Amino acid sequence: MTAINNQDNAIEKFCNQAIERRLGDISGLPEKLVEYVWLVYREFISSYLDILRQSERKPADWMPETLSIDAELTDGMRHFFSDYQHITREFYRLNQKMEQLQETGKERHLNLYRDMIDNILEGNHRQAKPGDGYESTG
């Protein structure tokens, strides 16, 4: 297995863990929303690892054994004048919207629930890249 495959596997594992810790089980959500959550988390965690490597002076192929997201480091990412800033803001926005969606409850307010999902997906105006598994709604 190559170093890139190892990194991809580690990032996928970190994404699984972060999504589960933050959002719980998302498998029952609409497919496009699940794909969007994965896209945002994958971009964020990849960016976070880049910043972590730089701050700890680690080589580009270094991967931690476990990943805990440091709020201070993450907050600092929102102030970079680069893609990190946009990725981190989208990560925060998604988490906030997903919390609101979970509080709404599908069973109690189905129409509101669907409208909230549409609102979350409308926030993604990027074009899907090959391998993303997500097509932009915008």
Image (spheres, helix red, strand yellow):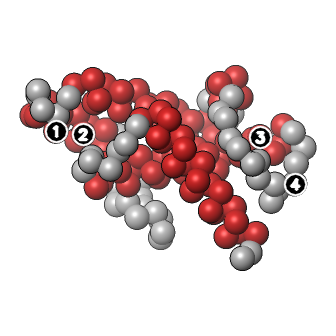
- Numbered tag placed on residue 114 in the rendering: 1
The amino acid type found where label 3 is placed reads Leu
Let me know if residue 76 appears in the view: no
**Residue receiving disc 3:** 52
**Crowd rating for badge 4 (residues with CA inside 10 Å; few <14, some 14–19, many 20+):** few
**Residue receiving disc 4:** 59
Q: Residue 133, image x and y in percent?
A: 40, 64
Label 1 close to label 2 by CB (< 8 Å): yes
The amino acid type found where label 1 is placed reads Arg
Q: Residue 46, image x and y in percent?
A: 64, 50
The amino acid type found where label 4 is placed reads Pro
Label 3 close to label 4 by CB (< 8 Å): no
Q: Residue at x 69, y 61 (%)?
A: 7
- Label 1 secondary element: helix
Q: How far apart are the alpha carbons under marks 2 and 3?
A: 32 Å
**Residue receiving disc 2:** 117
